[in-house]
Image (cartoon, rainbow, N blue to C red):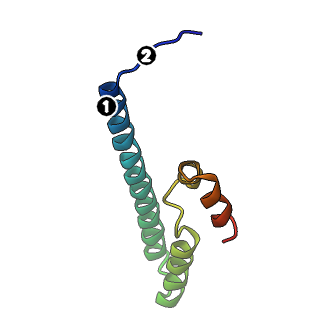
Amino acid sequence: MYDFYINSSSKRLIFRVMRIYFRNLQRMKLFVYLLQFKQVEEYMIYRKLPRNLRQRISDYYQHRYQGKMFDEKSILDELNECLKEVSSFF
């Protein structure tokens, strides 16, 4: 294995790049969700589903994917052990 030294300016640069990457990843997930939801809406219109049924299906999708636009594992990895333990109760 190779040992190498990363100076502090390089660490900051790496951190900034990773932060931008994860921010864009979250945006991409949101975009994919919105695209899928739009397809569902278009399908419901195409099938001429009644308005109340379309609303129920829309509500289901919003409830089903609510809070799923984030990477829970990466968030929990950032927490210290005490906060991880406390958050596990909810």
Q: Nearer the viewer, residue 31 or 27?
A: 27
Q: Secondary structure at mark 2?
A: loop
Q: Residue at x 59, y 51 (%)?
A: 73
* Residue 29 placement, left or right of 8: right
Circle 2 is placed at which residue position?
5
Q: With respect to residue 61, does 80 lie above or below?
A: above
Percent from the top left, x then y, of residue 43?
47, 69
Binning the other alpha carbons within 10 Å of mark 1 as few (below 14), some (14 to 19) or many (20 upward) gives few
Q: Nearer the viewer, residue 30 or 4?
A: 4
* Image point (51%, 90%), residue name: 52
Q: Which residue is mark 1?
A: 13
Question: Label 2 is placed on what type of residue?
Answer: Tyr
Q: Which of the marked residues, 2 or 1, is nearer the chain's N terminus?
A: 2
Q: Is residue 19 left or right of residue 88?
A: left
Image quadrant where residue 37 sits: bottom left
**Rendered residue at 54%/84% (across/down):** 56
Instruction: Locate the C terminus and report the quarter of the image it occupies.
Output: bottom right
Residue 56, above or below 35: below
> Where on the picture, by quarter, is residue 46?
bottom left
Question: Which residue appears at 41% of the width and 59% of the height?
Answer: 35
Between the C-alphas of marks 2 and 1, the distance is: 14 Å
Q: Quadrant of residue 21?
A: top left
Q: Considering the numbered disc 1 on the image, is that residue within a helix, a strand or a loop?
A: helix
On screen, residue 13 versus residue 87, left or right, reads left
Kindly indicate whether the residue at mark 1 contacts the one at mark 2 (C-beta within 8 angstroms).
Answer: no
